[in-house]
Amino acid sequence: MMPPAWIELLYLITAILSLTLALVGATLRSIRTSHVFGFVIFTLVTLLFFGRWTVSGHFPMFGAYESALSLAFFGGTLLVIAGIYCRHPMLTAYPVTVFLLLIHGSNYSSKIYALTISERGFWVHVHAITAFLTFGFALCLFTVALLVFLKYAVSLVSFLQATYLFYTLTILSGSFYRFQLFGKPWSFDPIESMNLACFLCFTTLIHLNASRPWSQRKLAAWTILCVVFMVLAYRLILVFPAWSSYHILDIGLRVHLLP
Amino acid sequence: MLTRLYDLLTSWKLSVALTLTGALYFLFLAIWGARSPSHVVQTISQMSPYILFYVLLLLNTLMCVLRRLKLLTGLMSGSLIYLPDNIDWALTVQELPPIRRKPRRSGESIYWIRHRYASLGTLLLHLSLFVLAAGFSLSHFSRMEGSFTAGQGQKLTLKPGHYERTTTPLPLTRKLPSLDVTLTDIRTEFWENRLLFTRFTVDIDINGKTHHAAINDPIYLSPFLTVRLTSFGYAPQYMVLLDGMPVPLEEGAARMNIFPPGQRDYLVTQHFPHRIYLTLYPDYVETASGPISISMKLKNPRFVIEVYRGKVFLIKKTIGPGEAIPIEEFIFSVVQILPTAEFTVVRDLGIPFIFLSFILSLSGLLMRLPGRRSELMAVPSESGDWQLLGKNIPEIRT
């Protein structure tokens, strides 16, 4: 079933407007203006997210298209909360992030399918939501690292610890769900291995900073690198062949198969 | 030399080197996983470089924890450790600011300690690695699986040797348990007319107790024993009749691989050598290009039956439940179609330890999240003011 035209139009408007506002903010070189633009884009993303939820009848989090929406929504939500908590312009880089996510998501089908049996259940929803929240924290981390370079007085370590906690929770909840679904907690599925590699990068960073505390700028630079690796670990799932990972739906049978 | 080895094994530099090496190892494994079958990746993950990495990581973690144990347990002390000498900032105030926590006294001074158990979080997090390693090791030497298929309404008594397929027995698990099973109900729903399960649940009695299972909701018979719902199918209930005989010569339900629609499988009766191939169409429609099933529901079920004796083709016919097909000297009839479910019994001694390690590591991280141990001390001065001293806590703005 194809989604209604107004959702597709809203998607397009959000993507175009996010690029436009990102370019305007960059041209004006104003952090505050970019932050305000971020709020505008977040409002549109929220409308898009709940609109998709309404028309599809389920939480929009599975599949390349819906996961792009969820990443944008959860990312924005955490950036807004972080901005209120630490009183910094956390939505500065949000418009360009949304543009990249929505453009990537637009390469995939927006058709509405019912959730399959392996996409239903409490634990799979816990796993997916913690994954989206982790991405949100990673966006916060990225923004805070940028603010460090812009000489804002922000604490990178607390965001790093929160990101690490949620990343751990994502991996552990995924492992538990894998046991529920396939009877084994780990399989070295490429998505599992990739995210474990990224997790160990964050572990290395935390150990390095704990053992011999780095300057904020040095920590910020390496944090950005780890966040980029995490984004790749999240989205590279889409270039793997369907047979290689149970994270990818077997399109023919519409079930998650053990490869 | 022993001192150097000890220093190496307890150094944070080795920890960093190991975690980075692990990141590279798993990145290679991910790339391999995108190009090779799963069993190849599993084999690679058990090769010696990976085992060596796990052993070194555990050894380094153990040595680091032992070396820093006194420091970490000391940080949990209820008495001041850093203050009054090792301060981050000092401030003079006329009145004490409102501080929520109840203060403690040290002579005339009062003090507060926050996040006292943060170092316990560090300990729990690192010790959880050992519980995790113990869990996976136990799993490696004890995991055994066996599968069985049951039709709706069918009663089975499974003895250890009666499972359809079992994995190789391992040192800690030589056999699977005996189970008395009655599959009381199978419920399936499909989305629109597509092969997309939106519901697949069963009610099953195991050893006299009723359980409910779904594909992602296994039955836990014990912390070490689970029964998983793994597959769905259809089984034709058939009869073999002879002309003139009032009772069937043979009847039963055949376990066949005939789902999803279009799959072809065969059965051989006990009395005749004929191979009877069946293809099930749950919602049969004849089209120009041949028969199809327009949905997954048993609305208009039909079997396309082909019969061979050796290599000789005998007959092809389409029949429904309750219909019969004459085959040389006997008559073959499909009575009804039974939904079936396949189950896998998993015995694994390591699973509870693995999940215990998850709880320990998350608890450790939660305890670490608020931050390191911080201390605040208020010392009265002769003029009636208070001197505030802080360590690991932001300067209080009054």
Image (spheres, coloured by chain):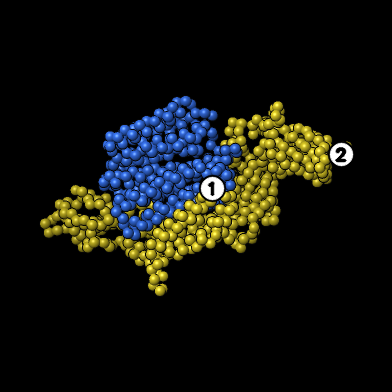
Q: Nearer the viewer, residue B66 or A122?
A: B66
> Measuring 40% from the left and 35% from the top, which residue is drawn there?
A99
**Outermost residue to the right:** B244
**Outermost residue to the left:** B383
- The numbered mark 1 sits on a residue in which chain? B
Residue type at tag 2: Glu
Residue B220 drawn above or below residue A55: below
Q: Nearer the viewer, residue B133 or B397?
A: B133
Horizontal side of residue B161 vs B358, given as left or right: right
Question: Residue A140: percent from the left, percent from the top?
Answer: 35, 44
User: Which residue is disc 1 drawn over?
Assistant: B34
Residue B316 drawn above or below residue B56: above
- Residue A23 visible to the viewer: yes
Q: Nearer the viewer, residue A2 or B272?
A: A2
> Measuring 66% from the left and 41% from the top, which residue is drawn there?
B233
> Measuring 26% from the left and 46% from the top, which residue is drawn there?
A151
Picture quarter containing residue B273? top right
Question: Residue B189: percent from the left, percent from the top?
Answer: 60, 35
Instruction: Say which colour chain A has.
Output: blue
3D distance between C-alphas at marks 2 and 1: 54 Å
Secondary structure at numbered mark 1: loop
Q: Which chain is yellow?
A: B
- The numbered mark 2 sits on a residue in which chain? B
> Measuring 82% from the left and 44% from the top, which residue is drawn there?
B310
Circle 2 Cα neighbour tier, 10 Å, few/some/many (<14 / 14–19 / ≥20): few
User: Which residue is disc 2 drawn over?
Assistant: B329
